[in-house]
Image (spheres, grey):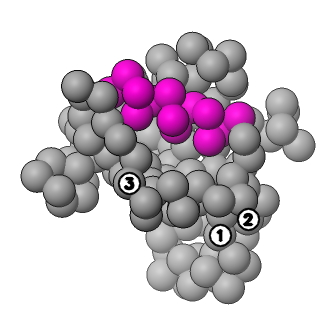
Amino acid sequence: MTIKLGTRSLSRLEGVHPDLVRVVHRAAAISKLDFTVLEGLRTLDRQKQLFAKRATTTMKSRHLDGHAVDLAPMIGGEVRWDWPLYHHLATIVKQAAVDEGVSIEWGGDWRTFKDGPHWQLPWKGYP
């Protein structure tokens, strides 16, 4: 069984860098875990809202330039927030990135402010 990205997820990939879009599509193709795209390209106003709520620690998010996406596992059609599911999804997305030859960073690997849904293209390769 592979996952098919829904219309909402596909629309949330609009404006996202094509390399990252390829990784998300590949992840869906190889995944048995259903997931959704929560957010891709983000406006500055949205970033300011998230910063004010302390849902982010930066005003220089890769979401602002289409170099990041937030992905969430789904069980029974509902977004889930349990960390073991994010670790499982991380294995899938990292494999998809290898398959596509794209360097990627996961917010769950960060030492501070762990961000399970967050995936981004690294600044070094994608300035």
- What's the residue type where badge 1 is placed? Arg
Tag 2, which secondary structure? helix
Q: Which residue is mark 3?
A: 6
For the N terminus, the quadrant is: top left
Residue toward you, 110 or 94: 94
Residue toward you, 115 or 23: 23
Residue toward you, 107 or 75: 75
Q: Is residue 77 visible?
A: yes
Instruction: Locate residue 21 relative to residue 5 in the image: left or right.
Output: right
Whichever of callouts 2 and 3 sits on the residue coming sooner in the sequence is 3
Q: Residue at x 74, y 46 (%)?
A: 17
Q: Residue at x 67, y 85 (%)?
A: 45
Q: Which residue is mark 1?
A: 42
Q: Which residue is mark 2?
A: 64
Instruction: Tell which residue pokes out farthest to the right in this image.
Output: 127
Q: Is residue 58 visible?
A: no
Q: Tell me which corner region of the image, top left, top right, bottom left or bottom right, holds residue 89.
A: top left
Tag 1, which secondary structure? loop
The magenta-colored residue range is: 19-31
